[in-house]
Image (spheres, rainbow, N blue to C red):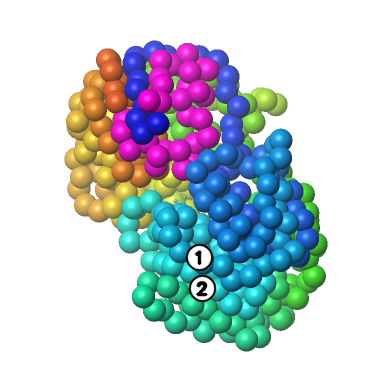
Amino acid sequence: MDSIHIHGGIALQGQVRIQGSKNAALPILAAALLTAERSYIRNCPRIADVHAMVSLLRRLGCHVSWREDGLQVDSAQVSLGSMQGEAVKGMRSSLCLLGALLGRCGEAVLEHPGGCVIGERPIDLHLWALEQMGVVFSEEKGMIRGVAEGLHGARIALPLPSVGATENIILAGVLAEGDTCVTGAAREPEITALCRYLQNCGASIEGIGTDRLRIRGGCRLRGAEYHVPADRIVAGTYLMACIGTGGCVLLKGAPAGEMEAVLKAASQMGASCWVSEEGICIQASGCPKPVERLVTLPYPGFPTDLQSVALAVLAASGGRSIVEERIFENRFRVAGELNRMGACIEQVDAHMVVVHGAGRLCGAEVEAKELRGGAALVIAGLMAQGETKVTGCPYIYRGYENICKDFRELGARIASV
Ligand code: UD1
């Protein structure tokens, strides 16, 4: 299953259900460590990153089992397990275990986490914020050890709205002594989902959805049920695929309320989008339109995780676009592969490219080097004339439950091999 073969040039038609959100499910699974009771996390996507998180939770002593539509996590017994190896290095979200373990056990030891190769991805803010809550860190042979004798609340002003750092503060804060106030917090919907799950467990968090959070510490948490919301990034990926192929698609269950910036970009690209009770409908035809300037920003701005797929679509547009990446540097790695498919993407600097729309792309053999860039290559393959082979697909399976089946349901000729 290392490669995906696509016979491109078919306009997508029909409807597809949007899977549960990866970036919401992962911190929620880490949060299930904070209670000594059983939680049931419904609508968890069956993707490689969730499987990696499950294996880490098991190493920590949790009983985790898949049920029909989700994961049951029983964290009655938690011990400091070995937090190293591929599951940690390959997945940035393993970092959430830091805040959760410090809250539950007062100690955490884990290998320096990885994730997709998109920029440096430092963890200084995570460590700095947790230090303010009484954690003392040491680093030895690539392992980070945090010890908190008396984890306590703090006033934390984040200098930039890091999603992961905000999540770690919340995770540590709910079991800390006293209240934690965060300003400059990230406002991504996945943080709201984490807070809602914790509220179901009995936590008290104010300011949810804003950049000022107040987390009441010391609550005794119980197990809870939670339904993971639909994945706005998967929905955005399929939406871009529809625009790129000039199709007509219903994205069932797509979280339209979280996708305003994406829907705005879609209409600039020439698509008509409307929201129904069932989800988002997109109608596109012909060549996508270029956009003057597409800029990625923290939520509610255009998400960096959809920058690569938008780039693929703009590469086949009929004119010049500028794409500016303001969250990560080194997130244009896919440009070289797209250029091999006939695109003309010129990198100005680490944060900006100029796309000279080529009108059409042609099939080629290309390599996925990270998750969202990999999805962008699949979309480029769907748009291109002829055959495309995308290798390096394990990256794509980290975030997409069944990208080939979903696109086949929409009429594409695509298979994983
Ligand atoms: C999360 C998402 C990822 C998304 C990103 C931005 C998960 C599992 N991943 O990643 O899909 O692309 O948000 O929406 O939810 N930074 C620092 N120091 C730190 C932490 C971050 O300088 O300690 C910088 C990063 O280098 C980056 C920016 O802050 O430039 C944003 O990163 P952050 O919001 O933390 O992203 P992640 O939580 O890693």
Q: Does the magenta stretch include residue 164?
A: no
Residue 109 circle label? 2
Q: Distance between the residues labelled 1 and 2?
A: 7 Å
Query: How far across and how far down the image is residue 113, in percent?
Result: 43, 62
For ligand 1, the image quadrant comes to bottom left
Quadrant hosting residue 417: top left
**Measuring 31% from the left and 43% from the top, which residue is drawn there?**
369
Magenta stretch, residue numbers: 390-417
Q: Indicate yes or no: mark 1 CB to ligand 1 under 8 Å.
A: no
- Residue topped by disc 1: 83
Q: What residue type is labelled 2?
A: Val
**Measuring 55% from the left and 47% from the top, which residue is drawn there?**
50
Dot 2 lies on which element?
strand
**Measuring 58% from the left and 77% from the top, which residue is drawn there?**
107
Which circle's residue, 1 or 2, is located before the other in the chain? 1
Q: Nearer the viewer, residue 82 or 252?
A: 82
Dot 1 lies on which element?
loop
Quadrant hosting residue 44: top right
